[in-house]
Amino acid sequence: MSASTRPVITTANLTKRYGRHQALFGLDMEVDEGEVFGFLGPNGSGKTTTIRILLDLIRRSGGESRVFGLDTRADGMAIRRRVGYLPGELAMVSRRPARELLTHLANLRGGVPQHRISALAERLDLDLSRPVRGLSKGNKQKVGLIQAFMHDPDLLILDEPTSGLDPLLQQEFLAMVRRARADGRTVFMSSHVLSEVQDVADRAAVIRGGRIVAVEDIDALRDRMVREFRVRVAGRVRAEDFTAIDNLRELHIEGDSVRCTVDGSPDALVKAAARYTVLSLDSTEPDLEELFFHHYNRNGADGTVGIEGADRHAAA
Ligand SMILES: Nc1ncnc2c1ncn2[C@@H]1O[C@H](COP(=O)(O)OP(=O)(O)OP(=O)(O)O)[C@@H](O)[C@H]1O
């Protein structure tokens, strides 16, 4: 991060209690101008609570929260004017056609050219003539995205933006985020899975149980990722081709197939598999809970240590 960047979002020792339930425990976070920042955490970890505080939709219990240098409690209105916000749960019950609803929202924000709304709708493949109320979850999500992006806000705050979007549309969405960044905007987006933000975010904070357990460059976070792989080859697998690979855990070899968990890069696994004729190769991303289990649980919350040694089991 260069010295000239300014923080767009700052929280310091931010806390939130809902009655007797404490949802946030002293959050410290800084998001710089012009960056795409992922806010990652499992369900119930406090992502939506943090976002609502930043927009002054709910009030913090203690600590500091600032957006554009403004205090969220004192200047909520001024902050919201410069933000495009996609809520995690969209209540879209209007009988109006999508274009009418979007035009109405655009007018509340001082006006947006119709061609801008049309271009975004075309990009996301949304029919603007249909009443919002009857739209599918995915199409409602598109309306939500258009209203967040259409006025070119300085800051986009997107709560689980890709939920309900199919993979092609997710790519379109990521292109919109990259475009916003290229235009100098700042993007803060939450997700409960790393894969949704890893191709576009510069950095990410990981929140769990109302505490930030890591803030890292996205590449470093990706390197920590554990992934499960299954490879099937023509012929019988020789166990020794795989048991010597350092970053494989839970290695199971049976007949023509290899199943394992890979810590970080799958390069060595892929090269070992390439000695055979590969019939299939599948990989699944474990959820964040599993990532935490492997990386953050054992040695405290700093996210720097705690990677378990390989648990090898070869049943040739
Ligand atoms: N209005 C509320 N009253 C009481 N508890 C709440 C309220 N809103 C959230 N909580 C609790 O605060 C914690 C954090 O919730 P929050 O919705 O911020 O998490 P999240 O990370 O956004 O999760 P999700 O991805 O499921 O939306 C949870 O334990 C939740 O049950």
Image (spheres, grey):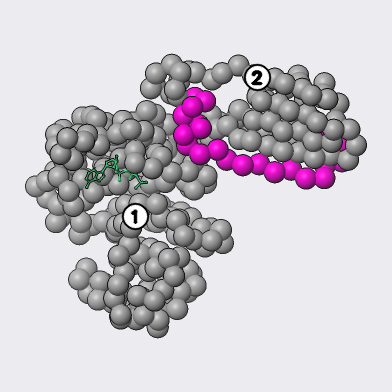
Q: Residue 161: give x, y in percent of width and height.
A: 41, 55
Determine which residue is flagged by label 2: 311
Q: Is mark 1 within 8 Å of ligand 1?
A: yes
**Dot 2 lies on which element?**
loop
Task: Look at the image and tell me in which quarter the N terminus lies.
Answer: top left
Q: Is residue 27 above or below residue 84?
A: above
Q: Nearer the viewer, mark 2 or mark 1?
A: 2
Within the image, what quadrant is residue 284 found in? top right
Task: Look at the image and tell me in which quarter the C terminus lies.
Answer: top right
The amino acid beneath tag 1 is: Gly
The amino acid beneath tag 2 is: Asp
The residue shown at (57%, 40%) is 285
**Image quarter for ligand 1:** top left
Point out which mark residue 88 bears.
Answer: 1
The residue nearer to you, when weighing 134 against 205, is 134
Q: Is mark 2 within 8 Å of ligand 1?
A: no
Query: Residue 78 magenta-drawn?
Result: no
